[in-house]
């Protein structure tokens, strides 16, 4: 790999940096070790408030003792229904410190989903963020006989509430302080009594093909996975992370909260999901992990801003990114970079690339991490051309986070890297399905032994992902087993490759390619509302609402141009012939989207069957 970047600062550390064989043991060791240092920051009324390790420990102790005073016993379950914030982390660590089981619920879930998740997990304590989430809990309270108490983080607008089963987080801390006076040492006993093999977390899958399944993770598996992350990513106490992905998702829980706990990195919490771009620029994280949708959004924002730039600025960017692409090619090929090219890249950064990095907020980032869904190789190369290596990782809820990772010194576009050293991975000889085995693999699905038996066979986790393995030991995901398209002509098509190329467009947020048992491929597209509206305004395209925007001939033509661009990269049989634009503005509350804002392929195909059939007439 090129020596243009000093790679010593992004080489992972394989030594154990924090003792403890359970999550609470690690946490309390961290508090003792790092007491006065800042661990977390969160914006409150426009001001960043810092939490030291000692302050965090005090709050966790009071919440945990408050729970014990309410009768919360070891192995009891508490659920957290909230956006990602510091209170989420405090509650999570308090529940685990009590010897309990912590379960996260997406804040976008409907009341009926909250009921199912609380019922299935036998939740006895439910933490909720605010009045909006409390309303969901109260709506289904009568159907949850095991639920003893609802704890509210933010009581704004609820001070006159008269519900005996509802308590504020602050009042719970008061109960904890009172409990501590009479029962000193009780929490320490709970922490010491918690065993590595005990159930720690429930992480529910999105349930795209039926009821959500509660994946069970033990303390041993979590600690093992977190230490495993340390062999994949170079992160330490000098780093700053940004926390914005849902904490009920395994990526932010293990790769964000617990990995920061382990390494001592600072966690900065965004104000809300809408302020992510602004907060990223404000925080300028040194290590930044996100899902492809976020990286696509940043890229499309730059492309839109570029169209409004002056001719001189556009020319400066074009020259600079071309130089960056030459550097990226050298890096990817493992070739040295000549002195002249290094000089040109230094000039390119000064002319344009540094400004692009600042516009996104990655100007301090040592490296970027992408995972949770496939990403376009062109997008990885674009960030590399900016001068920031992007490392792709692959894992799933059931592997407790990453199971493979692209090494910083051997980036391969389109690859998810070799198997991580802490688990085994192989391909099923018959189906090419990726199989994983290791202590990080989950314990099974709660209350669903038949689903567990289908997924765990002879110690191997059957992931449902189909892949390839090259001579260097690098894996590549080709698709989900259930998503592979076999056309009427018998051609096997990998839809994710086409979809990723389409999502590289600044005007397309998501795409679902159709064509199983059909004569040709079609696609359902969700447009990027902000960018398409901007295009319409700049080109005097009349529209009155979202639906009329998607139906405008000029917008149809715009999307057709993007499809034509992608089609040129594929063989004729793999080219998209027709498309349909979703004319409804979707949000995470809509059933067509997962909580991580991905279109549910099966549901979309069912719901829009008439539109799909129309494309084949």
Image (spheres, helix red, strand yellow):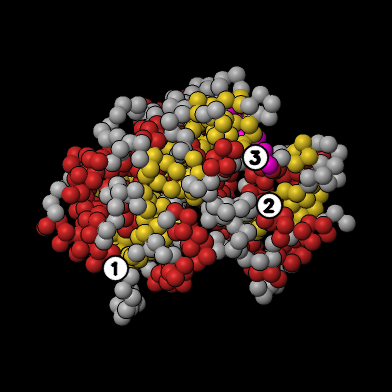
Instruction: Please tell me which residue lies in front, 351 or 590.
Output: 590
Q: Residue 561, position in %: x, y?
A: 74, 52
Between marks 2 and 3, how big is the CA–CA gap? 12 Å
Q: Is residue 174 left or right of residue 229?
A: left
Q: Is residue 324 left or right of residue 500?
A: left
User: Quick check: is 514 in the magenta stretch?
Assistant: no
Which residue is label 3 attached to?
A: 480
Q: Tag 3: Cα neighbours inside 10 Å, few (<14), some, or many (≥20)?
A: some
Q: Residue 569, position in %: x, y?
A: 73, 39
User: Quick check: is 479 in the magenta stretch?
Assistant: yes
In magenta, the rendered stretch is: 475-482
Q: Tag 1: Cα neighbours inside 10 Å, few (<14), some, or many (≥20)?
A: some
Quarter of the rendering containing residue 123: bottom left
Which residue is label 1 attached to?
A: 168
Of mark 2 and mark 3, the one earlier in the sequence is: 3
SS for callout 1: strand
User: Looking at the image, which residue is at 31% across and 74% down?
Assistant: 164
Which residue is label 2 attached to?
A: 602
Asked if one can make out residue 484 in the rendered structure from this viewpoint, the answer is yes
Label 1–label 3 contact, CB within 8 A = no
Q: Is residue 550 left or right of residue 39?
A: right
Against 159, residue 293 (above or below) is above
User: Looking at the image, which residue is at 14% across and 54% down?
Assistant: 183
Magenta residues, dominant SS class = strand
Of mark 2 and mark 1, the one earlier in the sequence is: 1
SS for callout 2: helix
Q: Is residue 183 left or right of residue 511?
A: left
Q: Residue 548, position in %: x, y?
A: 71, 71
> Which residue in the rendered view is the most extreme toward the top?
471
User: Looking at the image, which residue is at 52% across and 36% down?
Assistant: 394
Between marks 1 and 3, how big is the CA–CA gap? 44 Å
């Amino acid at each position: 790999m090129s020596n243009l970047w000093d790679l010593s600062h992004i080489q992972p550390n394989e030594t154990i940096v924090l003792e403890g064989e359970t999550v609470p043991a690690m946490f309390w060791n961290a508090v003792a070790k790092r007491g006065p240092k800042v661990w977390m920051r969160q914006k409150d009324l426009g001001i960043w408030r810092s939490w030291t390790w000692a302050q965090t420990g005090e709050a966790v102790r009071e919440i945990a003792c408050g729970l014990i005073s309410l009768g919360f016993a070891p192995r009891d379950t508490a659920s957290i229904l909230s956006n990602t914030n510091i209170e989420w982390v405090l509650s999570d660590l308090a529940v685990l410190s009590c010897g309990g089981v912590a379960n996260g619920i997406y804040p976008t879930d409907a009341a009926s989903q909250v009921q199912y998740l609380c019922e299935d997990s036998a939740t006895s304590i439910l933490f909720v963020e605010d009045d909006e989430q409390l309303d969901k809990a109260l709506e289904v309270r009568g159907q949850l006989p095991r639920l003893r108490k609802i704890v509210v983080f933010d009581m704004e607008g609820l001070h006159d509430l008269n519900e005996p089963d509802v308590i504020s987080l602050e009042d719970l801390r008061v109960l904890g302080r009172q409990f501590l006076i009479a029962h000193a040492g009780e929490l320490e006993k709970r922490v010491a009594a918690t065993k590595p093999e005990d159930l720690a977390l429930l992480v529910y899958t999105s349930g795209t093909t039926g009821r959500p399944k509660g994946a069970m993770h033990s303390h041993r598996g979590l600690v093992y996975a977190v230490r495993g992350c340390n062999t994949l990513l170079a992160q330490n106490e000098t780093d700053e992370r940004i926390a914005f992905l849902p904490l009920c998702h395994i990526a932010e829980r293990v790769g964000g909260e617990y990995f920061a706990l382990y390494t001592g990195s600072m966690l900065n919490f965004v104000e809300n999901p809408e302020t992510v771009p602004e907060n990223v620029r404000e925080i300028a994280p040194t290590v930044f992990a996100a899902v492809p949708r976020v990286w696509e959004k940043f890229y499309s924002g730059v492309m839109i801003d570029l169209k409004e730039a002056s001719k001189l600025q556009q020319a400066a960017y074009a020259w600079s990114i071309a130089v960056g692409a030459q550097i990226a090619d050298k890096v990817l090929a493992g070739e040295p970079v000549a002195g002249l090219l290094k000089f040109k890249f230094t000039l390119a950064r000064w002319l344009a690339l540094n400004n692009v990095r600042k516009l996104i907020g990655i100007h301090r980032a040592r490296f970027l991490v992408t995972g949770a869904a496939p990403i376009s190789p062109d997008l990885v190369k674009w960030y590399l051309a900016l001068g920031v290596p992007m490392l792709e990782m692959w894992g799933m809820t059931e592997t407790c986070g990453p199971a493979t990772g692209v090494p910083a010194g051997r980036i391969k576009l389109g690859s998810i890297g070799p198997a991580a050293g802490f688990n085994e991975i192989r391909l099923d000889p018959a189906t090419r399905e990726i199989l994983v085995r290791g202590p990080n693999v989950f314990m099974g699905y709660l209350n669903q032994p038949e689903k567990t038996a289908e997924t765990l066979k002879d110690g191997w986790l059957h992931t449902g992902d189909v892949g390839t393995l090259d001579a260097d030991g690098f894996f590549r995901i080709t698709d989900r087993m259930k998503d592979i398209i076999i056309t009427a002509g018998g051609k096997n098509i990998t839809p994710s490759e086409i979809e990723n190329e389409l999502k590289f467009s600044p005007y397309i947020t998501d795409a679902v390619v159709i064509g199983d048992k059909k004569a040709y491929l079609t696609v359902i597209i969700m447009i990027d509302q902000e960018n398409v509206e901007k295009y319409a305004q700049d080109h005097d395209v009349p529209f009155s609402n979202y639906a009329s925007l998607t139906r405008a001939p000029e917008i149809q033509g715009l999307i057709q141009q993007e499809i034509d661009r992608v089609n040129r990269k594929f063989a004729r049989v793999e080219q998209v012939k027709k498309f349909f634009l979703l004319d409804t503005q979707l949000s995470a509350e809509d059933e067509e989207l997962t909580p991580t804002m991905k279109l549910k392929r099966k549901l979309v195909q069912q719901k829009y069957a008439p539109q799909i059939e129309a494309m084949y007439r």
